Amino acid sequence: METSGELADVVARMAAGTGPVAVDAERASGYRYTQRAYLVQLRRAGAGTVLIDPLPLDDLRTLDAALADSEWVLHAASQDLACLAEIGMKPRRLFDTELAARLAGFERVGLAALTEQLLGYSLEKHHSAADWSTRPLPESWLTYAALDVELLTDLRDHLAAELDRQGKSAWAAEEFAALVASADRPPRVRPDPWRRTSGIHRVRGARAQSRVRALWYARDGVAARRDSAPGRVLPDSAIVAAAEQDPKDERTLLTIPGFGGRSVRRLARVWLDALDEARSLPDDALPVNQPVDGPPPPHRWAERDPVAAARLARCRQIVIATAEEHNLPPENLISPDYIRRLAWSPPEDITPQTITTTLQGFGARNWQTVLLSAQLAEALPDPAAI
């Protein structure tokens, strides 16, 4: 459906339905600059399955209001919550089938794998990386999209029962509540995003890095104007190669791999202007390494602070052993970043309570600190100093 009249019918149907509502969204990752939703799928008992094209609609707030009291069932909810919030949809309660499967100790947590293992149905996933901004959408793609929500509530029931059997339902509830709380939170803006250019480690020197920076921002501007994924405008490998070679004219630029395509050649002046700009920068405007927020990479700990490195090793052993005991991945028991921060700079007074306060300040959930704080309080002090 794609008109306001059809939306009103869908709102009425969904409001009259019963039980949880299965929700999914399709984006055009790898094709478009934005992460907007290009298709929204819903299924609810008594209402059936609905596919919504959000592009011609102002928003889906009326649908959101109709589902305000319902539990939403999503798979890998963190991937879809932001694009759903952008069109006015935010769950008040949710159940994430992927996260539930992780907490329950399933090795394979993809939707197709879980559906086959728990429900005995095979889902084809060959359209998962499609360009969902395509219009009109092919019938086979729409069938694929509908199947993504067809079995979600059945899967939810199986996983909920398994979590209950393992005594993990309260853990899952905390995790789901945290997802709801972050549903419409704006994404964290990374400082110096150009530093994440693939292959930048090969670019030596601040002057050459300024060329990466200039080309990255030039590409980002073009990608934003075209609503195209940056890598489709100019690949990272081309940026790195140009930064290393520093071409001064169009003929030299076009010999660099990645710059030979017709659409890239048409932008030759854009790339050369970016390189000219980087070349003209005074030394004090060149990139400098920014101070790291938090501890250094763990592989440097032994050299910089052997005592902290030993603390980290002891804490990791606690996390791994506890995760194995409770049959869940260590990264779902506690964020590795929280353990690194704790081990690098533990509280001055090490007690289970101070560890709990510190971890929860990082963002850890209550169930995680209940399982770990006492053991970490024992592991953190240097045994040689006791």
Image: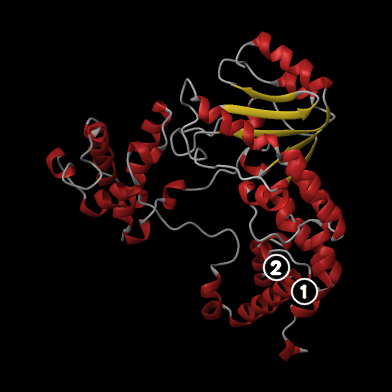
User: How far from the left and from the top, in percent, is residue 205?
Assistant: 31, 60
Quadrant of the frame with the C terminus? bottom right
Does label 1 or label 2 sit earlier along the sequence? Answer: 2
Q: How many numbered markers are drawn?
A: 2
Residue behind mark 1: 376
Residue depicted at 31% across the width and 50% down the height: 237
Horizontally, residue 53 falls left or right of residue 353, namely left
Q: Is residue 373 above or below residue 46?
A: below
Look at 48% across and 56% down and name the residue there: 290
Compared with residue 354, is residue 273 higher up or lower down, i.e. above or below? above
The quadrant in which the N terminus is found is top right
Between 244 and 148, which is closer to the camera in this rendering? 148
Please determine whether, in this image, residue 233 is positioned above or below residue 286: above
Where does label 2 land, which residue?
Answer: 342
Write down the quadrant of residue 18 in the picture.
Answer: top right
Cβ–Cβ under 8 Å for marks 1 and 2:
yes
Label 1 residue SS: helix
Instruction: Choose top left, top right, bottom left or bottom right for residue 317.
Output: bottom right
